[in-house]
Image: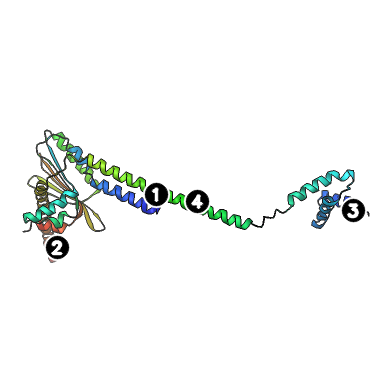
Amino acid sequence: MNDIQHIKHLLQRFYDGTSTVEEEQRLCDYFCNADNVPEELKTDQKMFRHLSECNAKVMPSEDFKQRLLSALDTHAKRSKIRWKRFTAVAASVAILVGIGITFYIKSNRNPYEVTDPQLAYAITQEALLNASEKLNKVDRQLEKVSLILNKNNRKHNQQ
Amino acid sequence: MKKHILTLIFAALFCVSNAYATKEFEDLAEIEGVDYIYISKAMLKNVSEVSILDGFDLGHITSSLSSLEILECDLCDTQKDLNKIRKTITKFASNMELLTKAKEEGTTVYIYSRSDKGNMTDLLIVEDEETEVYVIYIKGDIDEKAIKGLSIF
């Protein structure tokens, strides 16, 4: 079997789907390197050359790793700067909001707020004494209730 | 950093919200015959200084308080106004714990409180008579024992 017939045989096996990887590599080598391919195999040559190009491994350039690392480094620096900017803006907004709220509160002072310390003292004293009396009264009432309950319990236990 | 900023903002907002008087009481103050007084944290700090000079030291109580509010209605025109006050106060106290309810000589006293981690933060005392309502609302770090001790002497 001459070379062309062998190639045709391999092609037949290729199109039948029965060719091995080595046979396909042989076809690829032939079509990629041969210059004088018979007219009836020109279409096959085009297809194999195209397949060969598609399968060709793209090798990165020598400085690829360095460029990649440098690009990653730049990206990290940029995101750090971006984060710093965000922090600065957020802090500024927080400060401005704080100042705004403080001014708002000062300008909208409660009309019922006591501003005279002497008066505030008198009112507070009276209110706290009142609260104190109420709380103590409640305590005394609770003590009374507790005594009654204890009395009842003792009676119940004696019976 | 983000967490810190958010914490600061929330803390600022919390402080601001604490600085306000109770909205419900302010609204009730619009009713004719209602007297309402608000004493701020800053003023309560002043009270402690004045009280030292006066000889009746309240500083140990008032210095840790955020506000003190008093609402009094003894000249309310109508029963409708009184009912509105009662309704508002009951609603306001609904998220507080009722410590006690005592009735004596026609006056009902309600004592409500709110606590955080065992410390009393809110104390609301309501005295309800037939034609009068008197309310004391204390906010802050409340020392109940110290308040009780005021009327023992």
Where residue B63 sits in the image (x, y, percent)? 17, 55
Quadrant of res A24: bottom right
Residue behind mark 3: A6
Disc 4 chain ID: A
Q: Nearer the viewer, residue B67 or A100?
A: A100
Mark 4 or mark 1: name the one nearer the start of the chain.
4
Question: Is the Cβ of the residue at disc 1 closer than 8 Å to that at disc 2?
Answer: no
Name the residue type under label 3. Answer: His
Residue behind mark 1: A88
Q: Secondary structure at mark 2?
A: helix
Where residue B112 sits in the image (x, y, percent)? 19, 50
Q: Secondary structure at mark 4?
A: helix
Other residues around mark 3 within 10 Å, as few (<14) / some (14–19) / many (≥20): few
Residue behind mark 4: A78
Q: Secondary structure at mark 3?
A: helix
**Is residue B149 something that shows in the picture?**
yes
